Image (cartoon, rainbow, N blue to C red):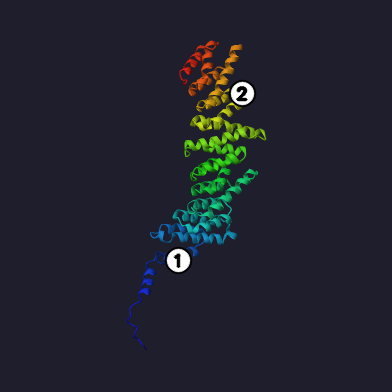
Amino acid sequence: MDRRGAGRAFPPFLFLLVFFAFTNPLFSQAPILNSYQQNFIRANLSMKANILRDAATDEEAKEFIGPLYEFALTFALGNAEILRDDPEMIALIGVAARGAGDSGYKASADTLWQIFQAYPDSLTRVSVLKALAVLGKRNIRIIGNLNQYLAGQNRLFRDGANPDYPSVSACVSALGQLGDTSSFSALFSAFTASYPNNISRLALESLNLLPDDYKYFLVDLIRGNPAADKLAALKIGVTNNRFSPAEQGQLAEAALEQGLNLSPASPGEDRDLAELRYIAADAFTRLRWTQGSALAVRHFYRVQTDFQNGKVPRERFIEAIDCLSVMESAEAAQALVLQLGFTNARTEKGGIYDEALVLAVIKAVGIIGDKSAFDQLLYISYLPYPDHIQAAAKEALTHLKW
């Protein structure tokens, strides 16, 4: 027999192959993983969860634990048809799902979603959703599935059905943690659905975890959706510290424009549009949003008419006056001067006036400081106003700009 090659060294490529095989973590973990898999297969259903718990305490667990959890999840998926309602199977899934999430084993994401669909109980679904909140990041398919599930539950609830509240809550939280802008519509729908059990609060928290550009979604809602959605979007935006004053002002401006331009189709819509205007005008005042001067003037005249017709209380009219005071525009000053002239004329004829309104207008024209208010402020000194109103008018005169 020819033995000439007996003493030859390994070819270089073969040496590297052998070295790689024995140093590759996947190769080195295989015997340990196989051992746990065999124990898992041999164990009865009640003991399988313990196999997973024991494996997690192994010093070398990080080398194999993810695939072991996936092995257990695949087992659960394969037996869903006959063990869907079995408490021990549900407990096993809980351990495997939590483990997959804690270990960050993203390869289990698709299996977890299949289990979510195969096992309808709340315990399983909540466990799966908590794991997917970690494993589904940047997974467009998983995020899309969760969006669809939440949107479907929202529709069921709006139609009068009782959804799986724990799963809805967990899904809302998961979408917030995943932080993808594609979830805005489903989360906003959950926020406005009037869910019990604090789901609306969770939906708002999750909305606030989305990237900054979700302000544009709110603007689109304010401009294109029904009045109730407009109102909800405005409330989210103008009370949210994550948005800058300029962004809050833009949201308020879009809302006030809608509230002034739209004709309500029902009493409920009328109430929503009115509240939309009041909240937007209050934001103008708080933010000193001078870009909205023309809208603020229109709002003032709308509230003035409603007040004169007894449709709104005095406080609403004073809020509209205060809103004009921060506009610092000639048109805002003109509207206030006309109101002061109207009040002075009534006082001259019959001595009837609303003291709080008079003081609010005097204060507002003084803040703006437009010299067009001079004549009406001076005229106050000739009318039967009490001393404190006279003093307020004199103070306002000192602030006029010439």
- Give the number of the mark in front: 2 or 1: 2
Q: Nearer the viewer, residue 77 or 132?
A: 132
Above or below for 224 versus 338: below
Residue 232 in view (yes/no): yes
Residue contact between numbered discs 2 and 1, judged by CB atoms under 8 Å = no
| Spot occupied by residue 217 in the image (x, y as percentages of width and height) | 55, 43
The three-letter amino acid code for the residue at tag 1 is: Asn
Above or below for 172 versus 32: above
Q: Nearer the viewer, residue 219 or 382?
A: 382
| Spot occupied by residue 234 in the image (x, y as percentages of width and height) | 55, 37
Disc 2 crowd rating (10 Å Cα; few below 14, some 14-19, many 20+) is some
Residue that appears at 57% across and 38% down: 232
Above or below for 222 versus 134: above
Residue 309 falls in image quadrant: top right
Residue that appears at 53% across and 43% down: 216
- Is residue 54 left or right of 201 when viewed as pictured? left
Above or below for 370 versus 185: above
> SS class of the residue under badge 1?
helix
On the image, numbered disc 2 is attached to which residue?
307
| Spot occupied by residue 338 in the image (x, y as percentages of width and height) | 57, 21
Residue 194 in view (yes/no): no
On the image, numbered disc 1 is attached to which residue?
34
Quick one: which residue is furthest to the front in this view? 402
Q: Nearer the viewer, residue 292 or 181?
A: 292
Disc 1 crowd rating (10 Å Cα; few below 14, some 14-19, many 20+) is few
Residue that appears at 60% across and 60% down: 81
Which comes sooner in the sequence, label 2 or label 1? 1
The three-letter amino acid code for the residue at tag 2 is: Phe
The Cα–Cα distance between marks 2 and 1, rounded to whole angstroms, is: 80 Å
Residue that appears at 54% across and 57% down: 89
Q: Which mark is residue 353?
A: none
> SS class of the residue under badge 2?
helix
